[in-house]
Image (spheres, rainbow, N blue to C red):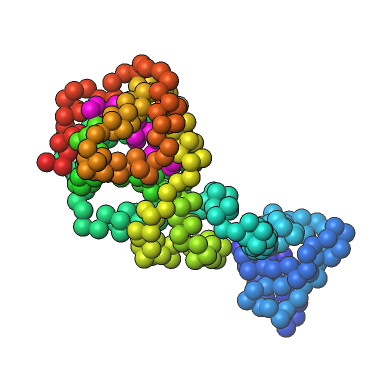
Amino acid sequence: MRLDAVGLHLSSGDGTIERHWPFAELRAVAPPRTGAPLRLTCATDADARLRLSDAVFAASLRQQAPQLFQTGLARPNVRRNAGIIVLLLLLLALFLWQGLPRLTAPIARLIPLAWEQDIGLAFRTRLLGGARICEGKAGAAALSRLTGRLGAATALPPTLSVVIVDRGMVNAFALPGGHIVIFRGLLAKAKSADEVAAVLAHEIGHVAQRHPTQMALRVMGIGMLGELLSGDGSGLAELAGEIGGTLLLLSYSRDMERQADAYGQDLLRRADLSTNAMARFFARLRGAKKSAERNALTGYFSSHPPLGERIAATDKDEGGQPALDAEAWRDLQAICN
Ligand SMILES: [Zn+2]
């Protein structure tokens, strides 16, 4: 028995046994124990057994084939399977105990970022239908400057993907994986880039706390759980596309809105932007007199209760640099032209 560069060479000397077991194909028949002989086989020679009691030889083998000497949970397959089983049992227990809605926050944190991004994109495609994404060159540059400024002030793992959509509604929303959609109507009603920055900061607050993913979990439910535990995530985007608009019918809880406000305010402060632009925007919309105008205006804000409390919460201090200079702000407002 000897080791060469690629494996273990076995020879009986009289020519009746001549075997070569590559290191990668070696398997331990039983978990190795200190002081006990090592029992080995080879994946390509599965009926054969080798009993190895020479500790020095075992030590040199260990350098070439360390996987043989990992025990119990250290072996990747065992660790992964055990992890999945424990997770499944925990989720099942929690599910029976609390029901799905209470679980969405912890589960959302388990979803890999790449899946979230795919899900977000599928939702966006579905939700926007035929609506055009505005790509005016100067406007896009202004938008990316604004997004970059806020993005730089946050330690978010998802990269933000913000688009302006050519629709008159005064609305904006965040989707899983850092996708944020702002409607042209919101740009038109905003009096300054600071107000758009405030809405954007609020939506980034939802992203940072994974609220959109929690909502997606709520509508995708068990299908998403199953995919999470067993799949590679490829089915999720498809599921998201099928469910589509249901996501927008749900609204965030007041707690989620407060969290997004708090995060948004903090983000604006860190980016050295005005922290009371949001309050100004809200106050103006609340002051909209005619009910028809009000309906057209409040798409975003009706899904963001309670307004009075939020105006107070966001109207704390002034200050900060303008989010964009006058020219870039005009460019942004004209992005759909
Ligand atoms: Zn919100």
Residue 199 rendering spot, x and y as whole percentages = 34, 34
Q: Is residue 297 visible?
A: no
Q: Which residue is at the front of the view, 8 or 199?
A: 199
Q: Is residue 57 left or right of residue 98?
A: right
Residue situated furthest left in the rendering: 337
Q: Is residue 66 left or right of residue 201?
A: right
Rendering quarter of residue 26: bottom right
Residue situated furthest top in the rendering: 319
Q: Is residue 306 visible?
A: yes
Q: Which residue is at the front of the view, 275 or 315?
A: 315
Residue 100 rendering spot, x and y as whole percentages = 56, 58
Rendering quarter of residue 229: bottom right
What residue is drawn where x is 46% and y is 61%? 220
Q: Is residue 35 left or right of residue 105?
A: right
What residue is drawn where x is 41% and y is 18%? 317
Q: In what quadrant of the picture does the N terminus appear? A: bottom right
Q: Specify the principal SS of the magenta part.
A: helix
Residue situated furthest front in the rendering: 290
Q: Is residue 191 left or right of residue 93?
A: left
Residue 184 rendering spot, x and y as whole percentages = 21, 41
* Total marks placed: 0
Rendering quarter of residue 236: bottom left
Q: Please report the bounds of the magenta region as a residue range.
A: 191-207
Residue situated furthest bottom in the rendering: 16
Q: Which residue is at the front of the view, 155 or 108?
A: 108
Q: In what quadrant of the picture does the C terminus appear? A: top left
What residue is drawn where x is 36% and y is 23%? 276
Residue 225 rendering spot, x and y as whole percentages = 54, 62
What residue is drawn where x is 18% and y is 23%? 326
Instruction: Determine if the magenta segment contains residue 101.
Output: no
